[in-house]
Image: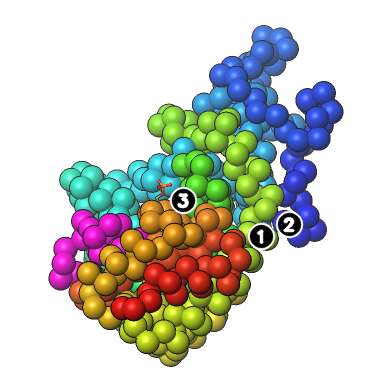
Amino acid sequence: MKPESLMMTHGYVPEWSENAVKCPIYQTSTFVFPTAEAGKRFFALAYGKTDPQEGENPGLIYSRLNNPNLQILEERLSLWEDAEDAAVFESGMSAISTIFLTFLKPGDRLLISNPVYGGTHHFVHNYLQSIGVHVEHFTAETDLVNLTEELCKDKRGAEIKLIYAETPANPTNAVIDLKLLGEMKIALMKSHDTDVRMAIDNTYLGPIWQKPLDWGADMSCYSATKFLSGHSDLIAGAITGSQESILAIKTLRTFLGNMASPNTCWLLTRSLETLSIRMERQASNALHVVRFLQDHSRVSRVYFPGLSSQGTEQVSIQNRQSTKAGAMISFDVIGGEAIAFRVLNKLTLIKLAVSLGSNESLAQHPYHMTHADMPELEKEDLNLTDSMIRLSVGIEDSEDLISDLKQAMEGL
Ligand SMILES: *Cc1c(COP(=O)(O)O)cnc(C)c1O
């Protein structure tokens, strides 16, 4: 069955909870063991000291290790990408930093795309580098075939333990070739006889329209605060991936204690039920808005995956690795910061706020807001100027969204 059919019921047994059709919130820190022997067995399973028998479920112990809300959510989340397992966290940043801390040690090298989410950028440069992890960047413009050849010969290639990318990139919607990254991973492992992981921040398009695990990624990670939640009412993160990678991730999570709470998991489980219909509606609204913006005389460029203005190579990568373009649009207005601010201040239905992927539409100014911390030269290099507005398109009526943009841009 398709994930859409399973999202309401999978992994939950009504008999566990007075036949309630929906899973209640298990707001409890600890669980009663039926016997001392059972408690001993549960711990042995939880710490991997023994393998479960056929059909044996690991018993519930303590909510930092396991909780029904966490486990049901993780099972359902895995379905979208046909992943072997998933791990949910109390924020996107805790998911991402747990990937780095699990797979990188001092002396290792991280190969990471640029730009990435500001918090990711900060953690890499202010923490990972300070403990002696080497960091090397590539962009959507980098020739990944050449880079792979170079790294297979060079000894710095032997230091690479993690390839990490965010695609499409925020806020320019530049896409990075997942197929070439997957091939790079295999080539590096063969040339240097090392273990290399690949993790993709799939917040923008996944898990519906882009499936990095199909291109050789070991992990797909998310700010679950965004599309997965879709209601701007929680902060959470998630990783889906191979059994082996997620086991390593969950082992560290148990001791960092950054798993999501029962309440957050319950809200996210509810959100997943409508993920597909929300994202479909958001994507179709976005296409209407893109067409309106492309035709507007005061808009100089629209940045949206698959548009010919993104370049022919970008379009072919986008078409190969994603089934839709999503609901994130950036556009440049003629007149720089003053005009961009005037438009933002005049929007009424569309709210002026950061974050994205929610059912209400949001607009912000990347240059002075989400990307304020980035050096100006780096921003100019990536076409990220003070003329840019970023829109996250929600599920409203598309005509109403266009009317709001139209009135905000009137008389420019
Ligand atoms: C928001 C975001 C994050 C960080 O997630 P939080 O839930 O805010 O911790 C990471 N990556 C991307 C692409 C994001 O948009």
Q: CA distance from mark 3 to mark 2?
A: 21 Å
Circle 1 Cα neighbour tier, 10 Å, few/some/many (<14 / 14–19 / ≥20): many
Secondary structure of the residue carrying tag 1 is helix
What residue would you read off at disc 1?
A: 276
Tell whether 349 sits left or right of 208: left
- Magenta stretch: includes residue 370: yes
Q: Quadrant of the N terminus?
A: bottom right
Circle 2 Cα neighbour tier, 10 Å, few/some/many (<14 / 14–19 / ≥20): some
What residue would you read off at disc 2?
A: 4
Q: Is residue 177 above or below residue 37?
A: below
User: Mark 2 and mark 3 in contact (Cβ < 8 Å)?
Assistant: no
User: Which is more toward the observer, 330 or 122?
Assistant: 330
User: x, y (%) of residue 64?
Assistant: 52, 26
Residue at left offset 20%, top offset 47%: 126
Dividing the picture into quarters, in which one does residue 331 lie? Answer: bottom left
Span of residues in magenta: 364-379
Tell whether 258 sits left or right of 127: right
User: x, y (%) of residue 412?
Assistant: 31, 78
**Disc 2 Cβ-to-ligand 1 distance below 8 Å:** no
Q: In this rendering, does residue 307 appear at all?
A: yes
User: Mark 1 and mark 2 in contact (Cβ < 8 Å)?
Assistant: yes
Q: Earlier in the sequence, mark 3 or mark 1?
A: 3
Q: Is residue 375 above or below residue 123?
A: below
Q: Amino acid at mark 2?
A: Glu
Q: Earlier in the sequence, mark 2 or mark 1?
A: 2
What residue would you read off at disc 3?
A: 223
Secondary structure of the residue carrying tag 2 is helix
Q: Earlier in the sequence, mark 3 or mark 2?
A: 2
**Disc 3 Cβ-to-ligand 1 distance below 8 Å:** yes
Tell whether 105 sits left or right of 260: left
